[in-house]
Amino acid sequence: VYTSEFPPFYVTVDIVVLCVDAGELKVLAIRRPDDDEHFPGAWALPGGFVDIDEDLAPAAARELEEETGFRAELEDLHQFGTYGAPDRDPRYDRVVSVGHLVVVPEALPVRGGSDAAHASWEPVAALLDGGHGAMAFDHRQILADARDRARTTLRQLAALPEHRRMAAQLLPADEFTLSELRAAYDAFLGERTDAANFQRKVKGRVVLGLERYRAGPGERGRPAELFRVMAPDEPVRLPRAEHP
Amino acid sequence: VYTSEFPPFYVTVDIVVLCVDAGELKVLAIRRPDDDEHFPGAWALPGGFVDIDEDLAPAAARELEEETGFRAELEDLHQFGTYGAPDRDPRYDRVVSVGHLVVVPEALPVRGGSDAAHASWEPVAALLDGGHGAMAFDHRQILADARDRARTTLRQLAALPEHRRMAAQLLPADEFTLSELRAAYDAFLGERTDAANFQRKVKGRVVLGLERYRAGPGERGRPAELFRVMAPDEPVRLPRAEHP
DNA sequence: CCAAAAGTGTTATGCATACACCCATGA
DNA sequence: TCATGGGTGTATGCATAACACTTTTGG
C-alpha cells in the first residue's frame, strides 16, 4: 500500500496492435468475460499499468511482448493520444491511459497468459461499426484514433522516416513484391489504390528494387521484382526519368 | 493523504501558450527562483495537477485562465504529446504530463498569482536555441513538439477544421487584412511566405473576404480588403477562376 | 493463343513556388 | 509624380489520379 499527498492516478498504456490478415485490417482485442461487472462480453484493447521505473513506450513494448511475444523497437511504437476522462474506467477512481500504435507483420499467435487468454485478432472495421459487439471503456474512440494515425502516416510522403518505419512492419518478409505491399497499404487505407500509381509513389522513396525477380512456381503472370524497405535515414533515390 | 494499491503517479498538464508579439513567436514561460533546488533560474512551462474529477483538456483550460485570465474553448486546446520518463521531475517519484498547445491572439498581461508571479512572454526561438538560458525538466522538448504541431497545423490545408480554429486564434480582431494574418503565419512558420501565394492559399479555404476595405488614416498604399476566418464546418468557397 | 499479373506511357488536375506586373492610395 | 503596400497573371515543378497500353509468364 502506497500513500501520496495528491489524488492517486493510475497511469496505463493501451496498445493498438494492427496487422493485415487475410487482406483485412485486424486488431488484437481481448474479450471481457460474460460475467464482467461493467462490460460483459465486450471487446477491449490490451493494456496495463506502467511500472514505477518505466517510461511510457517501454511499458507499451512490454505489454506487446507479453501478449504476442513480439518485440518491437521503441521507435515503432507511436504514441497517438492520451485519454483521461474522469469516468472512463468505472473500476477505479482515475485511470489515465496513453495510447500507443504498433503495426506487426502478421497475426502472431496469441500467447497464453493472464488476460491474453481471451485475446484474438478482430476486424477493425467491424469493431468500429459497432456491429461486432460494443467495445469496453472508450476503446472504440482509441481504436479510431489509432487507425487515423496509421492512415495519415501511410498517406503522407512528407514524414519519410515514420512512414518507412511503419511500412517496414507491414509485411513479414524483408523482400516482397509491390503487389504484396500495396495489398497491405490498401487494407490500412480502406481503399483500392491504383497499381501503376503506387509504383511511382513508393519506388525510391519508401522501397528500393533489388533487380531480382520472384521465381516461385505456380505463379501466374509476369514475375514481379523484389523490393526492400529503405532505412529511415536513407536518401531518396528517384529512378531516372523514363520517357524524355 | 491518499492511499492506493499501486505506485502513485502524479498526472499534470503542461500548457504551451503561444502568441505572436512584436512579429515574434513567444511563449508564456515561468522563471524558476534562483534558489530552486533543481533548476535555479531556468525557464519552465506553466502547468499543474489535474483535479480528481477533471478531464485533461479542462485542466489545461483552467491553468490557462489562472495564468492569463484567457478562456479558451476546449476545441482550441490541442493535446500533442504525453511525457512520462521516470526521472523527468526530480521532485516527485513519477509525474506524467500531458502537453497541450493553445494559441492566443495577443500577449495578454500575466495575472498576478501563485507561480504566475514570475511569468512572462519569452521568444520561442531563443528558448529552443538554448541561448536564452536552459529550460527546466524536459520542457525544451515539450516546447519543440508544440511548435512542430502548430507548424504542421498551419501548413496543412487538409485538416481544415483544426487549421481554421488555430487561424482564428492568431489575431485579436475578428476582421483583419491578409497582411496581418500572413505576418502571424510567418511568425509561427519561421519563414517569409510570398504575399501573392498566401492569398490564393487561404482565400475561400480559411478566410472569406468581406468586400469592405480598411479606411484607416495614416495608411500607405492601396487599402486592403478585410477578411474573417471561416467557421470550422463552413464549406470551401473558392473564388471563381479569374482568367479563363 | 489467351488470361493474368507486372510494369510503363500518357494525360489531366491541383497545389506550391517564384516572380513579373498592375492597382490604389498618401505624401 | 513616386513610393508603398495590395492584389492579379503566368510559368514551372511536383504529387496525385485515371486509364490505356506493353511485357512476361502459366495454362
Image: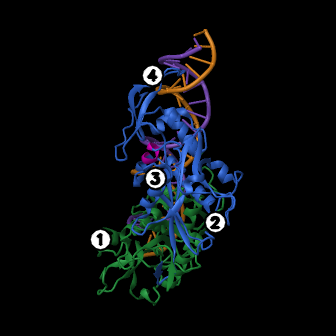
Chain colours: A blue, B green, C orange, D purple
- Say what amino acid the circle numbered 2 marks: Ala
Mark 3 vs mark 1, foreground winner is 3
**Dot 1: chain letter:** B
Q: Please report the residue visible at 43 percent of the width from the left and 30 percent of the height from the top.
A: A226
Instruction: Give the amino acid at mark 1.
Output: Gly
Which residue lies at the image location 44% right of the left edge and 79% below the top edge? Answer: B46
Q: Are marks 2 and 3 on the same chain?
A: no
Q: On the picture, is A170 further left or further right than A127?
A: left
Location of mark 4 (residue): A215
SS at badge 3: helix
Camera-nearest label, 2 or 3: 3
Q: Which residue is depicted at the point 54% across and 45% down?
A: A19
Residue B52's image quarter? Answer: bottom right
- Asked whether the beta carbons under mark 1 and mark 4 sit within 8 Å of each other, the answer is no
Q: Left of A158 or right of it: where is A130?
A: right
SS for dot 1: loop
Same chain check for tags 1 and 2? yes
Dot 2: what SS?
loop
Q: In 3D space, how far apart are the residues under numbered discs 1 and 2 (Cα atoms)? A: 38 Å
Question: From the viewer's perspective, is the residue at label 1 or at label 2 nearer?
Answer: 1
Mark 2 chain:
B
Q: Which residue is mark 3?
A: A65
Residue A197 x, y percent position in the rendering: 52, 35
In front of the other: C9 or A108: A108
Q: In the rendered image, which residue does mark 1 sit on?
A: B130
Same chain for the residues at labels 3 and 1, yes or no? no
Q: Main secondary structure of the magenta part?
A: helix
Is D17 on the left or on the right of B118, as rendered? right
In front: label 1 or label 4: 4
Furthest-right residue in this view: A131
Q: CA distance from mark 4 to mark 3?
A: 35 Å
